[in-house]
Image (cartoon, rainbow, N blue to C red):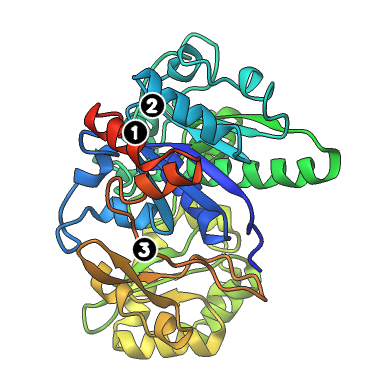
């Protein structure tokens, strides 16, 4: 058995945050019924066409789901959604603020007929407050939380190029739903969950927020180095290739000076004998390290770091990551079907012993509409009528 076998999730979802949360529930065995618009479905289906003609965002966040194309603005469509929610364990939604209330799909209304239901509402800013009705997308939340102000180089700000606000939000929705399922099993009560993108990414901003609030200034934009740890980042070796490593404590600093640089006098050098001092003298320290590395190739430097127990990395591009030997050695890839053909996808990182994550097909738009309606007891003739009326 998978941990969430027997759990049914109905998700009125689009883009990334809610689909990512729902997909993780599907990974653990939940049945996820994805409600989509008839006219194109989840708009992330058309973000790009790089995966056999399909969107990379969509295939990543929507495997192992069933797609029901349904016009919930029509009374017949809304009745079908209500019928599904009457039998569901979890309802996830991230449509425009206020929309579910106008349709009568709030937690207070749904629990009247389904007392154990768990409703997870995902929005940009959360319920209430001056911004409760505002829409936002990933870039805008990166702006609102201050993330962009500390990202990039000293000369230019940059956004995080993955949907980090959506991913953070999807993760907190996922974990909150798991907590609600556990509580329901123990106490027999459903739950209403209010997840905001602002608060989800805001939690991830904890270190720079407290650093700024109590230190008076924000951590400086530091590119691919670190604002508050040194040495940390790229350093050129004798072959002009960079190696990446980081020193996290004084024990590692001692080992680095003695075994890698072979300059034991640096351990207690008054410029560098604490992390705070090393950060203050970062430019001087970087120049000193690169002088020491000049006599070695990058491969030789990496070997020295390995022998000294210091964490290091090679700078991979995305293609190199996709062929990473560690992923291959740990058998992390699985074939997953899509409407356009089979692709290899990474297993989710939830490595719980005793079960295999679900890695089932990415659904085509409306692929499961008829089978879901038949389960609800709707006859073939009624299904045909719903199709003629553009309800499904």
- Which residue bears the numbered disc 1? 70
The residue singled out by tag 2 in the image is 77
Mark 1 secondary-structure assignment: loop
Q: Are marks 1 and 2 in contact (CB under 8 Å)?
A: yes
Question: 186 and 196: which one is in front?
Answer: 186
Q: Earlier in the sequence, mark 2 or mark 3?
A: 2
Q: Quadrant of residue 241?
A: bottom left
Using the image as rendered, state which of residue 308 and residue 60 is in the foreground: 60
Of tags 3 and 1, the one toward the viewer is 1
- Residue 294, position in %: x, y? 29, 82
Image quadrant holding the C terminus, namely top left
Of labels 1 and 2, earlier in sequence is 1
Q: Is residue 139 above or below residue 61?
A: above
Local crowd size for mark 2, using a 10 Å CA cut-off: few (<14), some (14–19), many (≥20): some
The furthest residue to the top: 130
Whether residue 11 is visible here, answered yes or no, is yes
Between 67 and 267, the one lying in front of the other is: 67
Decide if residue 15 is in sight here.
no
Considering only vertical position in the picture, is 98 above or below 25? above
Q: Which residue is mark 3?
A: 361
- Alpha carbons under labels 3 and 1: distance apart: 20 Å
**Residue 4 rendering spot, x and y as whole percentages:** 64, 57
The residue sitting at 59% across, 34% down in the picture is 210
Left or right of 341? Residue 278 is right
- The residue located at (33%, 55%) in the rendering is 363
- In this picture, residue 80 sits left or right of residue 119: left
Please say if 54 is above or below 208.
below
Between 322 and 149, which is closer to the camera in this rendering?
322
Circles 3 and 1: CB distance less than 8 Å?
Answer: no
What kind of element bears circle 3?
loop
Which badge, 3 or 1, is on the more N-terminal residue? Answer: 1
Badge 2 marks a residue whose secondary structure is helix
């Amino acid at each position: 058995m998978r941990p969430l076998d027997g759990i049914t999730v109905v998700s009125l979802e689009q883009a990334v945050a809610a689909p990512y949360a729902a997909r993780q529930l599907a990974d653990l065995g939940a049945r996820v019924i994805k409600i989509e618009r008839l006219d194109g479905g989840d708009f992330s289906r058309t973000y790009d066409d790089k995966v056999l003609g399909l969107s990379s965002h969509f295939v990543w966040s929507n495997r192992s789901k069933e797609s029901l194309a349904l016009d919930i603005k029509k009374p017949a469509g809304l009745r079908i959604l209500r019928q599904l929610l009457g039998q569901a364990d979890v309802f996830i939604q991230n449509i425009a603020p206020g929309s579910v209330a106008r349709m009568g799909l709030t937690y207070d209304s749904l629990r009247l007929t389904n007392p154990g239901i768990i409703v997870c509402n995902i929005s940009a800013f959360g319920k209430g407050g001056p911004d409760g009705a505002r829409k936002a997308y990933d870039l805008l939340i990166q702006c609102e939380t201050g993330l962009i102000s500390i990202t990039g180089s000293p000369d230019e700000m940059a956004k995080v190029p993955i949907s980090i606000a959506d991913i953070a939000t999807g993760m907190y929705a996922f974990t909150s739903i798991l907590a609600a399922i556990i509580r329901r099993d123990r106490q027999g009560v459903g739950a209403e969950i209010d997840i905001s993108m602002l608060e989800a990414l805001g939690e991830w901003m904890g270190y720079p927020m407290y650093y700024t609030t109590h230190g008076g200034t924000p951590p400086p934009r530091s590119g691919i180095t670190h604002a508050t740890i040194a040495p940390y980042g790229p350093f050129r070796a004798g072959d002009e290739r960079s190696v990446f490593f980081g020193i996290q404590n004084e024990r590692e600093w001692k080992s680095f000076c003695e075994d890698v640089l072979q300059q034991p006098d640096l351990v207690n050098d008054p410029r560098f004998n604490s992390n705070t001092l090393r950060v203050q003298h970062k430019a001087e320290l970087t120049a000193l390290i690169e002088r020491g590395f000049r006599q070695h190739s990058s491969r030789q430097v990496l070997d020295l770091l390995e022998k000294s127990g210091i964490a290091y990395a090679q700078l991979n591009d995305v293609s190199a990551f996709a062929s990473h030997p560690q992923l291959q050695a740990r058998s992390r890839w699985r074939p997953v079907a899509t409407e356009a053909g089979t692709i290899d996808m990474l297993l989710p990182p939830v490595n719980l012993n005793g079960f295999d994550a679900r890695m089932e097909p990415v659904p085509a738009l409306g692929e499961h509409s008829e089978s879901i309606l038949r389960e609800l007891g709707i006859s073939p003739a009624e299904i045909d009528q719903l199709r003629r009326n553009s309800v499904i």
